[in-house]
Image (cartoon, helix red, strand yellow):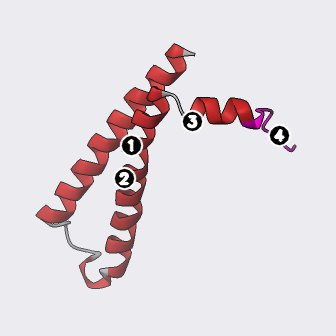
Amino acid sequence: MVWVLSIGPDQLFKWLESAGSRQHHLFAWPAFALIVGLAVWRASAVRFAAQAPGTRYLAVTAAAVVLVLVAGYWGGEMLLAS
């Protein structure tokens, strides 16, 4: 089954310009970048794969978790506002 996005360009730009969307994406994209970076970091550190992750890795993971939580909060605010 093919899903079609039925939002017109004017509606899409209006949604993207909203304050909630800006706040959401302010945290969502850095969280996404951190998660991808963590995956690359873990995959490239082959000799460390069997060991427990280091303090820096866990700190970056905690930062990504906080960004995901804040992005989720703002995403919920967007849904409640609409």
* Residue stretch in magenta: 1-9
Q: Residues within 10 Å of mark 2 (few under 14, many from 20)?
A: some
Where 45 sits versus 13, above or below?
Answer: below
Q: Which is closer to the viewer, label 1 or label 2?
A: 1
Q: Are marks 1 and 3 in contact (CB under 8 Å)?
A: no
Tell me which amino acid carries mark 2: Pro
First-in-chain label (4 vs 1): 4
Q: Are marks 1 and 2 in contact (CB under 8 Å)?
A: yes
Disc on res. 26: 1
| Distance (Cα) linking label 4 and label 1 | 27 Å
First-in-chain label (3 vs 4): 4
Q: Are marks 2 and 4 in contact (CB under 8 Å)?
A: no
Tell me which amino acid carries mark 1: Leu
* Residue 66 horizontal side relative to residue 6, left or right: left
Where 37 sits versus 32, above or below?
Answer: below
Q: Residue at x 50, y 23 (%)?
A: 78
Disc on res. 30: 2
* Residue marked by disc 3: 16
Specify the farthest residue to the right: 1
Is 7 part of what is drawn in magenta?
Answer: yes
Q: Which is closer to the viewer, label 4 or label 1?
A: 1
Is 36 part of what is drawn in magenta?
Answer: no
Secondary structure of residue under mark 4: loop
